[in-house]
Each structure stands twice: as structure tokens, then as C-alpha cells.
Amino acid sequence: MKKFIVALLCLSCTCFAHEHGWSVALKQGYFVPQNKTLRTIFDGCGSKGGYFVEGALRYNVWKCLYVEMNASYFGHKGRALVSTTSDTEESNNSCCTYGECIKFKMPTFGAGLKYYFWFSDRTSFFVGAGLKGFFARIENDSPYVPHNDNQSSIGAFVHAGFLFDVYKGLSLELFGDYLGSRLKCPWQNTSSTRYKLDVSGFACGIGLDYCF
């Protein structure tokens, strides 16, 4: 118990040496939705997930605690589960054809807290969480669903990773994030019945941070 308390005190002392007013970050990673149906739709065009980018602005409010505002974007093409072509035509196309294409775009905006645990002068582990707004834009060529479906919802994010100081405020970040939210979508244009589409998923990647 004493060793644990001493370790926490050492981490707290290290924080004072790494306090900064503002920092900015730009991250790129790979996002995979946890919803099986969404993964199947994306897999119709070659992969179950896709690349996404995120930018963040942080401000140091206390020791190694930061307030963070972030924005991310994820986009992917998919193939409708209900095909409008014959099996022969479908086998000759590695991706979607007319009447099957789905374009999925999802920008997000979030705000939360992030805390850094510095293990040395150049290495830290961080954890953070907060709320996110999800704004999905879905374009369908399939006649069985609405052509355009724009939905938004409030969800949450949790992230963790490691930060490595490189040179004079410039740092390299390795991260793993979880984004969670569900959208309420109509079955068709003339229907009031709605279903919940789970757009939650996991992301991991690399980024650059700069403190000033």
C-alpha cells in the first residue's frame, strides 16, 4: 500500500513538469463498427471498417487534467444486403452496382476530460471520456430504403493510449478509442416505424500532438 501511494505521489510530481496551457492533436486511425449488420454492408466493398481522422484541442485545467474538444470524420462505401441484380451479375462485381451502393458518412463532435499519467520525462499513459454528437449521412441506391437518411444522436467516447515526447512540445500518440451511439432511423419514407442503428465501434491509430 505504501509503495502504491509513493507511486501516485511520484506521478503527481511528474505532472507539474509537463503542465501546458494548450495543446492540439491530429490523429488518423482505423474504425470498425461493432454492429454485425453494418460490418456486413461495408464488407461488400472490401473491408469491414475504414479510416477516420480526428482533431482535438485541449486545455490544462489542473495538474495533468485536460479539457478536450474534438471532431472526427469516418466515411465508407457499402453494398446493400438486398441485391437488385442477379447472382451472375453480383459475382462479377467486387463492389456495389447501381441500385446497391450505400455511402455512409459520420462526422462527430465531442467534449470531455483527459488525464495523463507520466511514467518518465518522455512517456505517459492517458485515459479520457466524454460526450459526442454523431451526425450520420446515409445515401442509398436501393429502392427498399430511403434514398437519403440523415440522423443525429448523442453518445459517448472513451479513449486511452500512450504519448511519447519527441521534440520541444511535439509528441507521438498511440491510441485506442471506443465511440458509442445509436441512431433512430425509419424503415422507409412513408413509414413512421423506426429502428435503432448501432453506430458504435472501436478505433486505433497514431497521431501527433503539439503543446504550447
Image (spheres, rainbow, N blue to C red):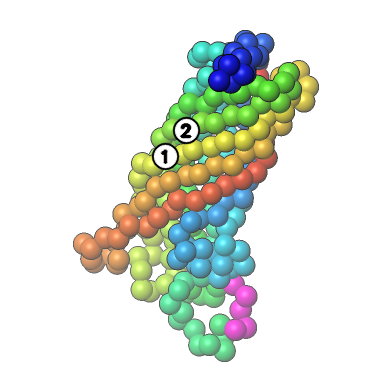
Label 1 Cα neighbours within 10 Å, binned few <14 / some 14-19 / many ≥20? some
Whichever of labels 2 and 1 marks the residue nearer the N terminus, that label is: 2
| Residue at left offset 50%, top offset 14% | 61
Q: Which residue is drawn at 51% across and 31% down?
A: 128
Q: Where is residue 166 in the image (x, y as percent from the top left)?
A: 77, 25
What SS does tag 1 mark? Answer: strand
Determine if residue 22 is in view.
no
Q: Is the magenta stretch mostly helix, strand or loop?
A: loop
Q: Please provide percent x and percent y for residue 36.
A: 47, 64
Please state which of residues 119 and 190 is positioned toward the viewer in this rendering: 119
Amino acid found under the numbered disc labelled 1: Ala
Q: Is residue 112 magenta?
A: no
Magenta-highlighted residues: 91-95
**Are the two marked residues, 2 and 1, in contact with CB atoms closer than 8 angstroms?**
yes
Residue holding disc 2? 129
Mark 2 is surrounded, within 10 Å at the Cα level, by few (under 14), some (14 to 19) or many (20 or more) other residues, namely many
Which amino acid type is marked by label 2?
Ala
Q: Nearer the viewer, residue 15 or 74?
A: 15
The residue lying furthest to the front in this view is 1
Compared with residue 209, is residue 91 higher up or lower down, i.e. above or below? Answer: below
Left-right relation of 172 to 113: right
- Residue 101 to residue 163: above or below: below
**Residue placed under numbered mark 1 in the picture:** 156
Give the position of the N terminus as an image quadrant.
Answer: top right
In whole angstroms, how far apart are the C-alphas of marks 2 and 1?
Answer: 7 Å
- From this viewpoint, which residue is outermost toward the left? 192
When the figure is inspected, residue 55 is found, relative to residue 199, above or below; the finding is above
Say which of 76 and 199 sits in front. Answer: 199
Mark 2 residue element: strand
